[in-house]
Image: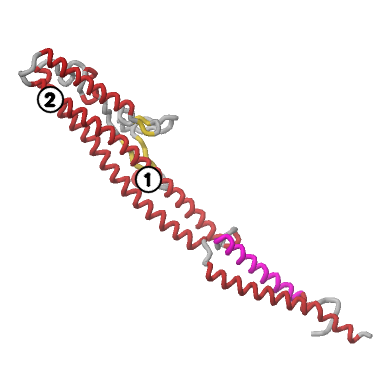
Amino acid sequence: MALIINHNMLAMNAARNLNTSFGALATSTRRLSSGLRINQASDDAAGLAVRELMRADVSSLQQGIRNANDAISLIQTADGALGVIDEKLIRMKELAMQASTGTYSSDQRLIIDSEYQAMASEITRIANSTDFNGIHLLNGNLSSTNHDGSSMKATGQLKVHFGTGNDCSEDYYYIQINDSTASAFGVGLGAGTGAGASISTQALAQTSLDVLQNAIISKDKIRASLGALQNRLENTVTVLEIQAENVQAAESRISDVDVATEMTAFVKNQIMTQAAVSMLSQANSLPRMALSLIG
């Protein structure tokens, strides 16, 4: 190569190599400081697209887990209230059995019936007051099979969404809870004047036994249905947790930086940058050699 002073080609070449090495060093620094292999689309355009979809799925799955756990809490609230109603119905049947025997007078049966009616009123009060996050559970609001979520307040059975899509077979369950008031069970004065309404006479007390038995069975069916659904939701939570964990692992393999590998590249780029700086300094001094030929 000729010794010239108009163009310093060696310095231009060293500067180009320095820019390349310094750019690679900046990339390694950015990755190591953020912990991410992909910090901008130019790092890996295809990987970025896949990563963002996976991140969306992970966030949706985690929210689905929270939704399912909320539904479990709702079911437990309803089941706890039904457990108390269960005690009231059992006591009402005990009172009906007591009033069915002939060893009590009419006045005594009226006293027994007053407690019977008090139990019925308490069942209705519990059913009307049991709510979860403002959603009444046992007053019949959730008894309809037709779910309508188009208005501000959804009607019919309650929809629990936990999947990442909107496929009913995979992404959500319905919670249906029948009316659990005393009148719905057919007991107490709110049920009318037929069997189960009162135990003020021996005959009414005897006919109320079958009604109370059916009421207990109806209540047990509601609790059994809720228990089965709670088991399904608990299994769903387990599956969602496994799914979220594995999608997160896949996203991590795409997105996160391998610190050991990147640190090796960082040291390499650091050495090459230092070498390029040194050589650029040397290349800039070479044209001065021409001065020794002049003068």
Q: CA distance from mark 2 to mark 1?
A: 43 Å
Residue sticking out furthest to the left? 102
Residue 142 coordinates in the image, percent (x, y): 32, 31
Horizontal side of 197 relative to 140 (left or right) equals left
Residue located farthest toward the top when viewing the structure as drawn: 107
**Secondary element at tag 2:** helix
Question: How is colour applied across the structure in the image?
Answer: secondary structure
Secondary element at image label 1: helix
Q: Which mark, by number, is residue 246?
A: none
Q: Is residue 101 above or below residue 170?
A: above
Of the pair 113 and 154, the residue shown nearer to us? 113
Residue topped by disc 2: 209
Residue 26 covered by magenta stretch: yes
- Identify which residue is drawn at 20% across, 22% down: 187
Q: Horizontal and vertical percent for residue 184?
A: 24, 25
Q: Position of residue 138 (x, y in %)?
A: 30, 30
* Numbered badge on residue 171: 1
User: The disc labelled 2 sits on which kind of residue?
Assistant: Leu
Q: Where residue 213 sits in the image (x, y, percent)?
A: 15, 29
Magenta stretch, residue numbers? 12-35
Q: Is residue 59 above or below residue 197?
A: below
Q: Relative to 259, say whether 144 is above or below.
A: above
- Image point 53% across, 70% down: which residue? 260
In magenta stretch: residue 69: no
- Image quadrant in which you'd find residue 209: top left
